[in-house]
Amino acid sequence: MLSIIQAAGWPIWPLILCSVIGLALVVERMLSLRERLVSPPKLLDEVMTVTRQSLPSAEVVSKLHDNSVLGQVLAAGLRAVMADPRLQEATLRQAFENAGRVCVHQLERYLNTLGTIAAAAPLLGLFGTVVGMIEIFGSQAPTGASNPAMLAHGISVALYNTAFGLIIAIPALMFYRYFRGRVDEYALDLEQAAERMVPHLMRFAIRPTNGGQS
């Protein structure tokens, strides 16, 4: 590996940096986007069961918030009802929507960086190729003689950088698309959970009587 890096020349170092950052982002997103941390399958049913008769305590809501990303959304709805028993359905839906936006933004963290690496790696490889071509032409003397050492080094720089750029870009693009799909699935799960919770929580809202309206 060290010999390949030496043969590829200095343009390989930005690609190595991209590969290290890309690998770290992939590992981080793989750990952070696990189902049990984002949308536990039975959490919604458990919350609806607990709140069937009455609203939970603030301590229970705090534990729900810390449980998962879905728990954050559900806790936002519960807190909205607990804070204003007279809230309207539109207000409750807005509370869920605002919490959902924040959570989706958290799920999308670092994805733009990973997508940028996928797009930039081939360009960095192309840059290395251009540097290698310059060295190839620089190895040609005005008299027509060539320097074999410079010629070989220029070819190595051109080929290694192109290959290394593609080796980084292809997996980065595949993981970017995969994580983007996972985030879209989780966003749909959060939306569906909120839709189920709205009528469930509105049962606890105090509805104004006609006589109390001005």
Image (cartoon, rainbow, N blue to C red):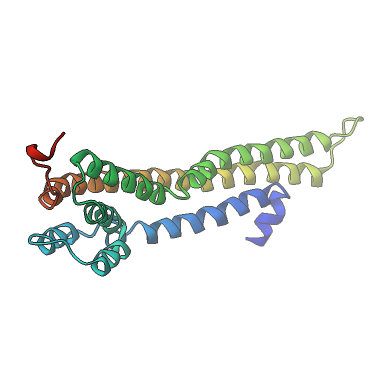
> 82 or 155: nearer the eye?
82
34 relative to 196, above or below: below
Residue at image x 60%, y 41%? 162
> 19 or 155: nearer the eye?
19
Give the image location of residue 62, x and y in percent: 30, 65
Specify whether 53 is left or right of 110: left
Q: How many marks?
A: 0
Give the image location of residue 66, x and y in percent: 32, 65
> 15 or 111: nearer the eye?
111
Quarter location, residue 187: top left
33 relative to 132, above or below: below
Give the image location of residue 173, x and y in percent: 45, 43
Give the image location of residue 137, x and y in percent: 79, 33
Locate the N terminus and report the quarter of the image it occupies.
bottom right
Residue at image x 38%, y 48%? 102
Specify whether 91 is left or right of 9: left
Residue at image x 17%, y 44%? 195
> 134 or 147: nearer the eye?
134
Specify whether 27 is left or right of 73: right
Looking at the image, the residue that sits furthest to the right is 143
Locate the C terminus and report the quarter of the image it occupies.
top left
